[in-house]
Image: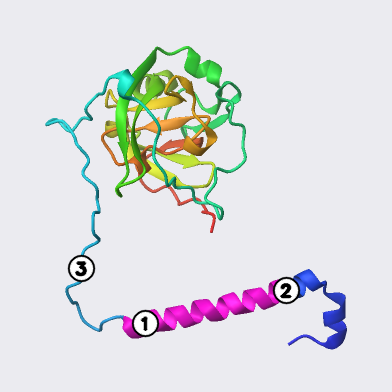
Amino acid sequence: MISRREAIRISGSALAGLSLGALQGENLQARAAQQSADWPDQLVQRPMREGFPAPLPLNADGSAPEHQPDEAGPISDPLMWRTPDRQAPQMEYDYKKMKVKVDTRGLGKLAGTMHFSDLEKLPQVSHAYLLQCGAANPRGVVKWTGVKFSDFADMLGLLQGVHYCRFVASDKMYVDEAMDTLRRPQVMLAWLMNDQPIPPKHGAPLRLIVPFRYGNRSIKAITEMVFATPGLPMPPLTG
């Protein structure tokens, strides 16, 4: 409880925030109590989630089928961002001005801040693949342009002892991917989508493309890459 004098000193907006926080806390507690009451006290058969995961067509060797460039088009909604408004966080979207932290932790010859000029030195590739999430949407055949991740890894001079890379996005979403996977020839770092700069909502300025995985593995808006052996701590995530 706060005194009347203390309440006078607190702005109306702050009081509103306190009241809203209390209401939200009560709602969350009530919801948790209801869920606990409804939860069975033993293992029971439950219905599976309908239509999930959506089929991901792959070749017999596990690679993604390649499409013709003229099949490329938009990606359907909804898009997945870990932000309160589900929109891409504000950052520098121009791929020519990108700044990506690259930490090889003593396991590579190069480390520091990567710029587009570093990627320009590598052979450029373009491929059209289906991007398919575990749910029915978002999905779409997209032409991506960028560089092979294996060429990028070779440029860094990584040792064989590197087991995986952690990619952190602008919304603090992250994925860990094994180097054996990242070095497969279809994996890309892309900055163009359908021959245009990747739009902010689709992951500007730089996106990882892993076409033989569901779309959430093709992480958007990369801000950081950390190469390491197992045991990296998890970075803090936004609410």
- Circle 3 crowding by C-alpha within 10 Å: few under 14, some 14–19, many from 20: few
In which quarter of the view is residue 59 placed? top left
For label 2, the crowd category at 10 Å Cα-Cα, with few meaning under 14, some 14 to 19 and many 20 or more, is few
User: Which element carries disc 1, helix, strand or loop?
Assistant: helix
Q: Position of residue 208 (x, y in %)?
A: 40, 32
Q: Which region is colored magenta?
A: 16-38
Amino acid type, callout 3: Pro
Between marks 1 and 2, how big is the CA–CA gap? Answer: 30 Å
Q: Which mark is residue 36?
A: 1
On the rendered structure, is 164 left or right of 235?
Answer: left
Colour scheme used in the picture?
A: rainbow
Residue type at tag 1:
Ser
Pick the front one: 167 or 49: 49
Q: Is residue 76 magenta?
A: no
Q: Residue at x 63, y 74 (%)?
A: 21
User: Which numbered disc, 3 or 1, marks the residue that appears first in the sequence?
Assistant: 1
Which residue is disc 3 drawn over? 47
Q: CA distance from mark 2 to mark 3?
A: 42 Å
Which residue appears at 63% of the width and 79% of the height? 22
Corner quadrant of residue 155: top left
The residue depicted at 82 percent of the width and 71 percent of the height is 11
